Image (cartoon, helix red, strand yellow):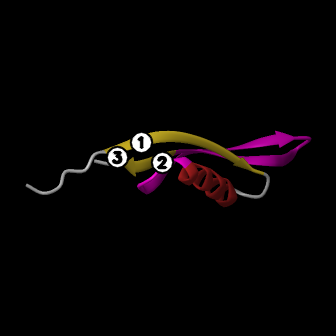
Amino acid sequence: MANPRVARVTEVVAGSSKSFDDAIQIGFSRAAKTLRGITGLRIMEQRVAVEDAKIVEYRVRMEVIFVLET
């Protein structure tokens, strides 16, 4: 039998004043500090915060997929 792998998914919300890409990088970097074995990300939602008719923050909600250690 092959080595079975079990993955887990956790949700992360991150924001950036620059771009969606930057928000993704910020969220991934933070998740990587505490989660080992990250194998992928799934972007679930993108939103912007608006003030005075200007975009002030790009926000992403993402799933971080990681393999549980045996």
Q: Secondary structure at mark 3?
A: loop
Q: Is residue 40 magenta?
A: yes
N-term-proximal mark, 1 vs 2? 1
Inspect the magenta stretch and tell me whether residue 48 lies in it: yes
Name the quarter where the N terminus is drawn: bottom left
Image position of 31 with respect to 11: above or below: below
Which of the 4 image quadrants contains residue 26? bottom right
* Residue 2 at x, y percent in the picture: 12, 57
Q: Which residues are magenta?
A: 34-62
Say which residue label 2 marks.
Answer: 64
- Percent from the top left, x then y, of residue 22? 69, 59
Residue placed at 43% from the left, 56% from the top?
A: 40
Q: CA distance from mark 1 to mark 2?
A: 6 Å
The amino acid pointed to by label 2 is Val
User: Label 1 belongs to which residue?
Assistant: 9
Residue nearer the viewer, 67 or 64: 67
